[in-house]
Amino acid sequence: MSAQTIPAYCEGIQYYGEPWAGFDRHAARAAIGEGRKAIADPSDPDAVFQTLLMADALRYVTLQMCGAKGSGHPGGFASSAEAYAALVMLGHTNIVTEVGHHAPGFYSAMFLDTSLEEMGIKTMADMMARFREKHGLLGHLSGAIPGLLAPAGPLGQGQHFAMAGALLHPGVLFPVTIGDGGMGEPYVLNSMMHFNTAYPTVTNYLPTLIWNGYSQEHHSMVSRMSNEEMLAYWQGHGFKEVVLVDAKAFDDSQQEGAYVDSSRFSLDQRLAFAKAVLEGVDRAAKSALSGSQTAFIIKQLKGTGVHTVGAKSHNLYPADTLDKPHMIEGLTRRALNPEAWAIVRENFSRAGGGPAVKTSVTEHVLELAPLGKLPFHDYAKDEKAVPATAMGALVAHVGKQDKRFVVTNADGNEASAMKNINDALKIRHPTADPLYNQEPTGQVYEPLNEDACAGLAAGLALFGSRALWLSYESFAINGWPIIQTVTQAMAELRRKTPAIVTMFTAGALEQGRNGWTHQRPEIENYFAAQMRNGNVYVLFPCDANAIQAAYDYATNSFNKGMVIIASKSPLPVYMSIDEARDAVEKGAATIYESKSGSQSNSGNRGTVVFAVTGDMVLLPVFEAKDKLEAEGYKVRIVAVVNPRRLYRPTDVSWDTVSEPDNAFMDDARFNALFDGDVLMAVSGGPSASLEPVLLRTRAKTRDTFAWKRGETTASPQEIMDYNGLTAEAMAARVKALAG
């Protein structure tokens, strides 16, 4: 072996092997010809041979990279290697995954196709140095890695990205690898079944089950299923074509058990298995692209071809370093000759039309339909209006202008006083029924699963399209993890993409009769904590005009997570549209201030400032104002609409994110709003959203009124009474503080 024959990118590879039998015959030239995007024939012996070379190259890079840090997860991806290689050789490179622990394998693929050169990773030595390091290759997929379409962390998310990609890009296949450990998450197939029903012609995504018998630390919950039972499981969820390739059928090494390590077969049988996988993936891909709901399943033992097998292969520990015998043995078994590495690089860099960093759909900004000016309705300050309904009218306009726009909601828009959305955009349902606003081509997606709602909306936004997730605040936690995943990915993206917009109605104060099951505003503390991330905004419009300004602001934002929280009840209007826009942009605005000179509110007992997040909770605040003015206090009520703007720049990681925003309220404006003798921070939910006010206020004394816990009540007033959110309590506390 001479240095001249070793490709430059292989610098750092520790072991090389001898050419496989038949190498000269089957690897004389790359199976993906120059100027081609894929192999011509999946049955071609050269293509089969080179697919297996690619699978072992992926295993080798994955294992040596993880071993360099004695950390990371090689085992799960190792059992998917033939399937992943087959997809690449067939030109299907827009691949996402449900399994964050497959990250090392996906990084290996991006290394082998040259995509990682975009971030300065050019050699195997670079891979080892940058793996699991800051500004490098983090332990799970993120939005920052060149060529990778979507992040992967919590199980049960990847299929949403594949479905979103399929919806936005007809004719492009979006495979999504799913581990059988994650099959214990019930919403994986559930969400795909609902999507299949709502979008029966959108079949260009391919769930690819990596059925290896194990989860992270034990046998998978589906490990005892027979092949027939697994096929029936998928078919029962609407998949008309399910292609299963079981390595056991090719075993000539007398392995015991239902799951076998194909790397232990003879070379002839390894190639026979690789051929079956390549032909099976080709059949499944063509089926999916031809209008049939299709899944592909590869069944082989977890850890196939790496340092050990089963759940023990899942994770490396500090003792699993490159100098240990079991690691050396795993690498030397997979070691390829230098010429094989050259062939693998050639095929990878041609597949799909070029490196993923240049060809993946998410590497380009998706053109957005122009919305024009949103049709605001400027409600008068002397009337009452329903905030949710006011926003619904704007949502309807967005959907009319942008036909790709999708609204998702599990509990139904009518229940949230947003029937106007359904009237205009229609619920997507195979049964046409005008009474229920149902049409097969509707833009309102309503699975009864918050994860599926949040997942599709988040996936569409990440992939470059506008979307909106609507929910009851009390149920939002069921879908929030994927929103958090996507907002974090958006913070790292190297391209612009529309903000993921959410709106949570039916706040705790409105849901008296439903009791505590519908009174869970504590999630607002979760949102509030995320505001420090740099690209998460929680908006508390105080009325029907403010919610219109908030939705306009959110819809025209990029690479951000926008949360709007508002009521579905008729409530007073405090701001004009112009005032509302200013409040959303600046962060807060005064909606009431005692007039000086009046005998009843002379202010001789001091100035009281109410800093308020929410809308319905303003009712007892205004009652408290009347009581305090009658006793000689001057009162100012400030609506805190966009609390992220009220932090100090040093409180927020604004300069670490894509599309950075460093607009924070300056001290002069802040003090003009919140200076007083007593500051009372009031929230209809928990108090964390008011943290920036409490951090910066110069008020001599301060206190909070906030949500405590839920109970069944007959009215909003009664639930506010139960939580101590009453005018009497507020006035009494102010007087006690004023002393």
Image (cartoon, grey):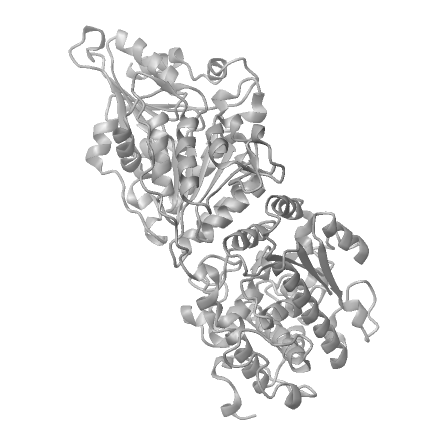
In this rendering, the answer to whether 667 lies above or below 591 is below
Q: Where residue 223 sits in the image (x, y, percent)?
A: 76, 55
Left or right, 36 with reference to 250? left
How many marks are shown on the rendered structure?
A: 0
Of 635 and 444, which appears nearest the observer? 444
**Residue 229 appearing in the image:** yes
Left or right, 667 with reference to 334? left
Quadrant containing the C terminus is top left
In this rendering, the answer to whether 438 lies above or below 119 is above
Of 677 and 124, which appears nearest the observer? 124
Quadrant containing the N terminus is bottom right
In this rendering, the answer to whether 276 lies above or below 544 is below
Q: Where residue 640 sits in the image (x, y, percent)?
A: 33, 30
In this rendering, the answer to whether 598 lies above or below 90 is above
Left or right, 713 with reference to 314? left
**Residue 216 appearing in the image:** no
